[in-house]
């Protein structure tokens, strides 16, 4: 079965063409920095390896460029769009409507659109990918895999907010959790690697969007993102945790309307608000050049992660391993070092030399004296989506 997986993030699109059930990877690629003049498009297939920089302003424009590469007479991997039998889509917010992988129809698209208010940086782009894929691959089955599904196992004490019960029971206002496909994939890899029957693992997904999950015996029991993917850790342009009284101060004292507050907290805050840059590579470069705002932002980012590690270690009454994954988690030795420094009270001791070594599928970067394993694991949400889509159809 030929499955094309489209994974639209807030500022990126990852894609893989996978043959199932053999899991043979035919081609893959990444488009990042969408909305910038220097967006980076990477594409790999057989001996073809393309990396180019160009201005790509929207996800729609980016998806069309990806499909052009797939169909390219010399560099492409398909001769006709009908060669694609299934398109698997990552969808960020499924609320309580979807707890499993789902065949997309008009009702599903309506539900995805309805959750746009809760995931404004993601669900519109996810839906755009579905609509474009339906046009470009008219005979393919379209399958949605939801970020929120993995976190359905969170106990009520973790997912419920301390607000009137009616809002929970009647309006479904609760913690939903996100990046579930990634957290599921890497935590399963860690459990297999550690050969543990019982496990206490903290999975740290760090990209433009960031989240951290407490995974007890393979199940999500707590998670940093909540009703929408905006709180918790400091992100590329999202503030993460913030005192809600600031919202009222902005409105009542500074004249902001609610749309402006929403834009401020989701598109103008986080690392962007602290430094003027949303891409961590830019921030690390500027910090190395003596930019104190960037140095402080990196320290704040790591400090927030440290606090969650402490909280989740307490919630699970112990810790076997922490996992760094996704673009920043896998590639930034700087962030990993900042997070793991002075964490020996939790049994976390980083090996600086191992931390700087190139990443394979799984890299162990703790010292031999560390009681907790520190793992860097390449996430593969696309393979997980392909496996779930194949499982649904077979």
Image: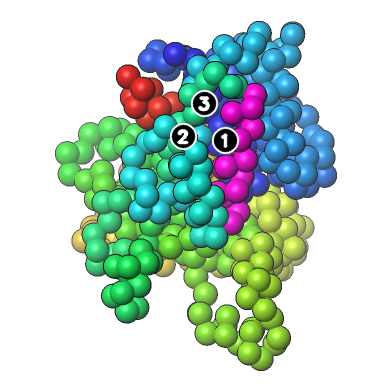
Q: Quadrant of the C terminus?
A: top left
Instruction: Using the image, determine if residue 320 lies above or below residue 60.
Output: below
Local packing at callout 1 (Cα closer than 10 Å; few below 14, some 14-19, many 20+) is many
Task: Specify the farthest residue to the bottom.
Answer: 253
Of callouts 3 and 1, the N-terminal one:
3
What SS does tag 2 mark?
A: loop
Q: CA distance from mark 3 to mark 1?
A: 8 Å
Report which quarter residue 158 is drawn in. Answer: bottom left
For disc 2, the marked residue is 104
Q: Nearer the viewer, residue 110 or 312?
A: 110
Instruction: Using the image, determine if residue 110 lies above or below residue 68.
Output: below
Residue 126 as seen in the image, left or right of residue 145:
right
Q: Nearer the viewer, residue 90 or 315?
A: 90
For disc 3, the marked residue is 87
Residue 339 locus on image (x, y percent): 48, 58
Residue 58 as seen in the image, left or right of residue 182:
right
Q: CA distance from mark 2 to mark 1?
A: 9 Å
The reply to whether dot 2 and dot 1 touch (C-beta < 8 Å) is yes
Q: Residue at x 22, y 46 (%)?
A: 217
Q: Nearer the viewer, residue 314 or 95?
A: 95
Residue 210 locus on image (x, y percent): 51, 54
Residue 146 locus on image (x, y percent): 43, 43
For disc 1, the marked residue is 130
Which residue range is magenta in the image? Answer: 119-136
* Residue 61 appears in view: yes
Local packing at callout 3 (Cα closer than 10 Å; few below 14, some 14-19, many 20+) is many
Q: Residue at x 51, y 34 (%)?
A: 89
């Amino acid at each position: 079965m030929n499955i094309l997986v489209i994974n639209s993030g807030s500022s990126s699109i990852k894609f893989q063409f996978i043959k199932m059930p053999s899991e043979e990877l035919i081609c893959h690629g990444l488009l990042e920095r969408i909305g910038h003049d220097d967006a980076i498009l990477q594409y790999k297939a057989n001996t073809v390896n393309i990396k180019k920089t160009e201005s790509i302003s929207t996800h729609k424009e980016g998806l069309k460029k990806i499909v052009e590469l797939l169909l390219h007479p010399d560099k492409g991997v398909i001769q006709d769009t009908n060669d694609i039998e299934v398109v698997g889509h990552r969808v960020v917010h499924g609320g309580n409507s979807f707890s499993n992988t789902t065949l997309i129809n008009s009702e599903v698209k309506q539900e995805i659109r309805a959750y746009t208010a809760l995931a404004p940086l993601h669900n519109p782009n996810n839906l755009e990918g579905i609509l474009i894929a339906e046009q470009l691959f008219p005979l393919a089955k379209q399958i949605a895999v939801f970020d929120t599904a993995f976190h359905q196992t969170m106990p009520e004490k973790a997912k419920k907010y301390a607000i009137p019960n009616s809002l929970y029971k009647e309006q479904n206002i609760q913690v939903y959790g996100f990046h579930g496909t990634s957290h599921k994939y890497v935590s399963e890899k860690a459990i297999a690697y550690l050969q543990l029957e019982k496990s206490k693992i903290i999975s740290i997904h760090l990209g433009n969007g960031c989240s951290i999950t407490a995974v007890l015996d393979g199940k999500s029991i707590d998670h940093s993102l909540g009703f929408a993917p905006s709180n918790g850790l400091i992100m590329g342009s999202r503030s993460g945790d913030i005192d809600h009284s600031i919202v009222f101060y902005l409105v009542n004292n500074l004249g902001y309307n609610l749309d402006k507050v929403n834009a401020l907290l989701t598109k103008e805050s986080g690392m962007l608000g602290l430094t003027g840059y949303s891409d961590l590579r830019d921030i690390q470069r500027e910090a190395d050049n003596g930019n104190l705002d960037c140095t402080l932002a990196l320290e704040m980012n790591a400090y927030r992660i440290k606090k969650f590690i402490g909280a989740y270690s307490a919630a699970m009454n112990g810790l076997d391993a922490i996992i760094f994954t996704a673009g920043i988690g896998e590639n930034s030795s700087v962030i990993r070092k900042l997070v793991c420094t002075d964490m020996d009270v939790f049994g976390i001791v980083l090996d600086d030399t191992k931390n700087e070594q190139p990443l394979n599928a799984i890299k162990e970067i703790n010292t031999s004296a560390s009681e907790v394993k520190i793992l860097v694991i390449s996430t593969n949400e696309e393979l997980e989506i392909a496996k779930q889509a194949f499982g649904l159809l077979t």
